[in-house]
């Protein structure tokens, strides 16, 4: 075996790394909880690792965010016990990390080349690659970007870095300008183009957006962004957290996936007709209808933690409570957003920052493609507050699960999403969540902060 993707770049990477005095390289991936896991290896061994791979314990995919092993056994442990997996680097993802001295990073994916029996689909990056292949086979491609909200808290007190609520305030953001500038500059050097930053509607809550990218690059950018923001926050004695709701009576931290659908060669928009770029095309309507049909299951993957269920309670007007859509309506689960004369794009508002970006994008593709394959009809848009009671949104609008038990049940019953993401990944996710439920003690927000705040 050898490294995947961009192998022809390796000689140039080796030469550049030596000239830039790169000393270490991380071989990194996001686990089930979107926690970055890695091995750091002296840079001089890069070529050897590209040939032989790098080993990680298989059970990393069933650990909770703090690294605890599950108390509810998973199929992964039953099948593989605690053996290693071999991962190979995707050299096309190589980048120098400006915020870490003399360090570079490359993403890895699990190899199944030596596996006996049916393919074991557990690695989130491989799961996304499989869905992108299905999309390509339909002669389609996807351009997308993740829009993250995250909490900045004092690393000692674990309280927000300010106590002010003032959305989009210029002067409030300027108090943290040094950190914001550092993040934007360093991420840009690492290949992630930060597009904008603003204060959100809770103390210490910021939002950053990124320029869109094609295919898997959007999820790779999100992975780089998450880990980079967390590391740079630590350098300022902050904790940056992507958990949904650490503090009672505050807002929720979401992660919206913005995307548009294109022809396979990236030249023709597929969500809207060129003759009328302000309305959805038949393909766009089918795609949206597929996402609405699978929305309850999607929440288990895109808002995956126990704490994430807070978002679906009706008191949060800008978080969805029903499977709804609307034109530029941010109270809906799915928002059709105009993009000037160049057309429109979709905003998936089902997710939180706790979701694994590879799984968020993969499950979005699976749901949309099912709508296209079955030519599902799109119900009318919701023109007003979609978080109101069912008489406002319509009787065919399905409520979204407000507890983790219902979300997991919806996921397991949804054969389309379960088969696309893989029963193996879903089993691991369920093992983690059920283990957390067994360990849950005390006040729910304090318990959630202890479990999720630092590493998610």
Image (tube, rainbow, N blue to C red):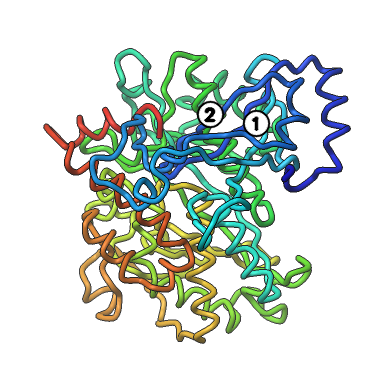
- Please name the residue shown 43% across and 35% down the image: 150
**Which quadrant is home to the C terminus?**
top left
Left or right of 215: which side holds 418? left
Q: Residues within 10 Å of mark 2 (few under 14, many from 20)?
A: many
Q: Residue furthest left?
A: 442
Residue 229 badge: 2
Instruction: Report if residue 168 is visible in the image.
Output: no
Label 2 near label 1: C-beta < 8 Å? Answer: yes
Q: Percent from the top left, x then y, of residue 285?
A: 52, 79
Q: Percent from the top left, x then y, of residue 173?
A: 49, 27
- Please name the residue shown 52% across and 34% down the image: 56
Q: Earlier in the sequence, mark 1 or mark 2?
A: 1
In the displayed structure, would residue 248 be above or below residue 256?
above
| Of 429 and 182, the residue lying toward us | 429
Q: Percent from the top left, x then y, of residue 78?
A: 34, 49
Q: Residue furthest front?
A: 116
Name the element at disc 1.
helix
Q: Percent from the top left, x then y, of residue 265?
A: 78, 68
User: Which image quadrant is residue 104 in?
Assistant: top right
**Which quadrant is home to the N terminus?**
top right
Residue 205 badge: none
- Please name the residue shown 79% across and 14% down the image: 21
Instruction: Report if residue 255 is visible in the image.
Output: yes
Please name the residue that numbered disc 1 is placed on.
187
- Please name the residue shown 61% across and 56% down the image: 144
Left or right of 260: which side holds 247? left
Name the element at disc 2.
helix
Left or right of 153: which side holds 45? right
User: Which image quadrant is residue 320 in?
Assistant: bottom left
């Amino acid at each position: 075996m050898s490294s995947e993707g961009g192998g022809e770049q390796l000689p140039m990477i080796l030469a550049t790394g030596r000239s830039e005095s790169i000393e270490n390289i991380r071989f990194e991936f996001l686990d089930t909880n979107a926690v970055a896991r890695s091995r750091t290896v002296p840079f001089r061994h890069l070529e050897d690792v590209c040939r032989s791979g790098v080993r990680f314990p298989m059970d990393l995919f069933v650990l909770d965010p703090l690294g605890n092993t599950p108390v509810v056994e998973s199929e992964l442990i039953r099948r593989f016990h605690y053996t290693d997996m071999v991962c190979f680097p995707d050299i096309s993802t190589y980048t120098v990390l400006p915020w870490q001295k003399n360090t570079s990073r490359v993403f890895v994916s699990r190899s199944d080349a030596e596996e006996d029996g049916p393919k074991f689909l557990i690695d989130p990056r491989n799961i996304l690659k499989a869905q992108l292949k299905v999309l390509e086979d339909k002669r389609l491609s996807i351009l997308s970007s993740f829009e993250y909200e995250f909490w900045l808290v004092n690393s000692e007190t674990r309280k927000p870095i300010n106590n002010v609520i003032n959305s989009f305030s210029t002067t409030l953001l300027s108090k943290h300008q040094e950190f914001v500038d550092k993040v934007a500059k360093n991420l840009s050097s690492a290949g992630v183009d930060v597009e904008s930053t603003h204060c959100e509607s809770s103390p210490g809550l910021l939002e950053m957006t990124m320029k869109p990218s094609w295919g898997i690059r959007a999820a790779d950018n999100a992975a780089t962004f998450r880990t980079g923001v967390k590391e740079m926050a630590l350098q300022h004695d902050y904790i940056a957290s992507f958990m949904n709701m650490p503090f009672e009576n505050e807002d929720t931290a979401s992660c919206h996936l913005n995307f548009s659908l294109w022809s396979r060669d990236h030249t023709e928009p597929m969500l809207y007709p060129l003759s009328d770029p302000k309305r959805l095309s038949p393909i766009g309507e089918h795609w949206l209808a597929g996402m609405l049909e699978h929305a309850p299951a999607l929440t288990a993957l895109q808002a995956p933690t126990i704490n994430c269920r807070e978002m679906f309670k009706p008191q949060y007007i800008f978080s969805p409570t029903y499977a709804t859509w609307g034109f530029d309506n941010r109270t809906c689960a799915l928002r059709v957003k105009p993009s000037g004369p160049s057309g429109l794009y979709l905003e998936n508002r089902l997710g939180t920052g706790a979701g694994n970006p590879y799984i968020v994008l993969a499950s979005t593709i699976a749901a949309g493609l099912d709508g296209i394959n079955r030519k599902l009809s799109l119900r009318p848009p919701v023109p007003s507050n979609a978080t109101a009671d069912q008489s406002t949104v319509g009787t065919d609008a399905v409520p979204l699960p407000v507890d983790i038990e219902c979300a997991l049940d919806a996921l397991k019953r949804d054969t389309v999403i379960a088969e696309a993401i893989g029963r193996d990944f879903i089993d691991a996710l369920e093992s983690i969540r059920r283990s957390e439920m067994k360990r849950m003690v005390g006040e729910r927000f304090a318990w959630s902060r202890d479990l999720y705040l630092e590493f998610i």
